[in-house]
Image: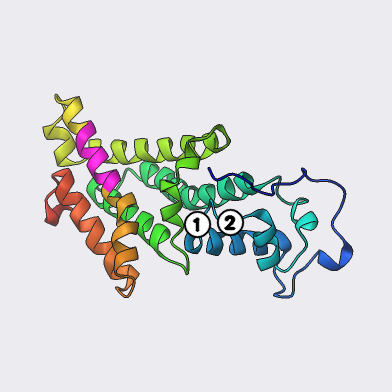
Amino acid sequence: MSGAVDEGPRRVGRPRADRLRTESGRPPREELLRAAAELFTVQGYAATTTRVVAERAGMRQATMYHYFAGKEDILAELLESTAAPSLALARQLLADTGRPAARRLWELCRSDVLLLCAGPYNLGALYLLPEVGGARFARFHRMRAELRQAYRELLDGTCAGAELAGDRAGLALRNDLVFGLVEGAMLIHRAAPARPVAVFAEATADAALRIAGVGAGTA
């Protein structure tokens, strides 16, 4: 981490009435998250202070502390917001046992890539920050671990899972490769942002199933 960061005091008192909504009309909390997403991904997390985030959101730094205790809180919420939709979908897909596991795995891969790469800011890149290893991000890591396990359970149900049933280490490696490809797709997209995200997401899902050892026709 860099040296001086003006994290300031924790939340104190209530925000001023004239700051309950920002000029954009969005609630201050949402405006702060949007401002931080832009600054963290464009300017860099270490180089961004809470003062700059508050100013970009159109409010005083003191007002910002009513909504977030500091920069780590903002980053944690941004990270959890990228994992939560995929985790919710994964739970639905695991319960949908009436459809082939390969198809459900493909849908999860595609949706995950869409979530990580869509939008004006590449929030998936925040996963790579060294600060994310801290204790404040334990909930995010639990969510990510559950999502990885959901990939594994779907992979277990495919023909590749059946073939590797006696090779748990081999199956774990396949799952790690699939999960790594999906999360790493954000770096590929960042290098070529003009590619349509929907097409990119489908191509990544196709590639993930090939890595898993699932035939193209089974998804």
Residue denoted by label 2: 48
Q: Nearer the viewer, residue 137 or 8?
A: 8
Q: Secondary structure at mark 2?
A: loop
Q: Nearer the viewer, residue 115 or 9?
A: 9
Q: Nearer the viewer, residue 213 or 94?
A: 213
Residue drawn at x 47%, y 65% is 121
Q: Are marks 1 and 2 in contact (CB under 8 Å)?
A: yes
Q: Which residues are magenta?
A: 172-180
The CA distance from mark 1 to mark 2 is: 6 Å
Residue furthest front as drawn? 3
User: Which three-letter amino acid code belongs to the residue tagged 1?
Assistant: Gly
Residue denoted by label 1: 44
Query: In the image, residue 169 lies at what x, y percent?
Result: 19, 26
Report which quarter residue 171 is drawn in: top left
Residue drawn at x 70%, y 61% is 54
Report which quarter residue 60 is drawn in: bottom right
Q: Nearer the viewer, residue 214 or 75?
A: 75
Residue drawn at x 70%, y 49% is 68
- Above or below, comparing residue 211 to residue 34 in the picture: above
Residue drawn at x 25%, y 56% is 205
User: Which three-letter amino acid code belongs to the residue tagged 2?
Assistant: Thr
Query: In the image, residue 125 lies at what x, y percent?
Result: 41, 54
Query: In the image, residue 213 lies at what x, y percent?
Result: 13, 44
Near mark 2 (Cα within 10 A), the count class, few <14, some 14-19 or many ≥20, is some
